[in-house]
Amino acid sequence: MARTPRGKWIEEGLRALAEGGPQAVRVEALAQALGVTKGGFYWHFGDRDTLLREMLDTWEEEVTAEVIERVESGGGDARTRLLRLADVVPGLTTDIHTDLAVRDWARRDEAVARRLRRVDTRRMDYLRALFSEFCPDEEEAEARSMIAFSVWIGGHLIAAEHPGRDREEVERLVWERLRA
Amino acid sequence: MARTPRGKWIEEGLRALAEGGPQAVRVEALAQALGVTKGGFYWHFGDRDTLLREMLDTWEEEVTAEVIERVESGGGDARTRLLRLADVVPGLTTDIHTDLAVRDWARRDEAVARRLRRVDTRRMDYLRALFSEFCPDEEEAEARSMIAFSVWIGGHLIAAEHPGRDREEVERLVWERLRA
DNA sequence: TGTCATCCGTACACCAGCGTATGGAATGGG
DNA sequence: CCCATTCCATACGCTGGTGTACGGATGACA
């Protein structure tokens, strides 16, 4: 049983969201991508909005713990883990697209904004905890957390070119200073 | 003559873009906002895509020089101008929304991405020039430019809450350090 | 083998948004 | 006053997307 279960639709929906934003998660498009027709979709969800909500549930659930877990599992002191963070996060390239799509979506939808707020707050808390381990000054830790988060986002959203360097190099420069 | 000239449509289009992204700039909606019907629109533009292109032309033109001009006109050394930058930029709240909308749009449209690349490169060049005035180390100036730009974006896109502080306070902490 | 739950296919109603066609109104120049 | 230019209103066709209705297939299990 369960030829195309709920999960498949959600998964495909998130893929579409990452690629083209909320407006790109179209029922018939998802159906085609899954090799079926929309017949079954409305049996599962009844509604496009329901899918959207469940997609966000899934995203929130997944994204909150995943990175933190992968970084923490390696152990080491805060600087080491920050290094691993800067190293492991770019690998989640599939996820950043979803992340950015949700971020833009949140600007026009309060329900999405609330979810994002929860997720971002947890991430910021994690960063703060890391920096606090070697930053005695509380304000310093806060500033560095904000910078780390911002540069992670900015690295994907800012289109500027850097004469004589590539973006990766510039980001490396920032991370070096954040760990100093 | 010129009851609702080209400029009005473009202006209204940019407003819609800022509020709801490219998909929100709908011909009939703009017409209604302007108190007319779409009749005249197709006389001016013939095409929705043409409007979109001209909107981006206008945006690129306006955004490139405006901030730099306002900051430079006040004079002072680099630190003073950076202070003014951090002060004047948040005032352009209308513009940040357009900016973010374009940024998201650029992720799915190469033509938009090219424009954004030009704009962002000019902004980054300006930041680099400012920081270079008191950062002897080239890499330091580059890192700070990236941080400044990123935190400007991040401040509007990151939804995290900061215990015991508000966002404005956190951004102030960052800017203090960037000017040190 | 029969039956129930689960899922899919198909056809259709419906709406929103783009673009077209065409006649008409206002406005400034001669 | 007349005419050209510029802009607007209205009505329509078309496409692409959501949601509905309902019959059919398929598999688990008794």
Image (cartoon, coloured by chain):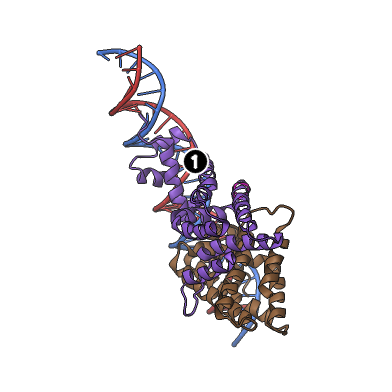
Chain colours: A purple, B brown, C blue, D red
A136 to D22, vertically: above or below: below
Left or right for B147, reference A17:
right
- Residue for point 36% across, 39% down: A37
The residue to which callout 1 is attached is A51
Q: Nearer the viewer, residue B16 or B162?
A: B162
Asked whether residue A54 is in view, the answer is yes
- Residue for point 48% across, 51% down: A74
Left or right for B155, reference C11:
right
Look at the magenta stretch and give its main secondary structure: helix
B177 to A69, vertically: above or below: below
Q: Chain of mark 1?
A: A
Q: Nearer the viewer, residue D23 or B170?
A: B170
Q: Which residues are magenta?
A: A112-116
Q: Is residue A113 magenta?
A: yes
- Label 1 amino acid? Leu
Which of the 4 quarters of the picture holds residue C11? top left
Q: Quadrant of the N terminus of chain B?
A: bottom right
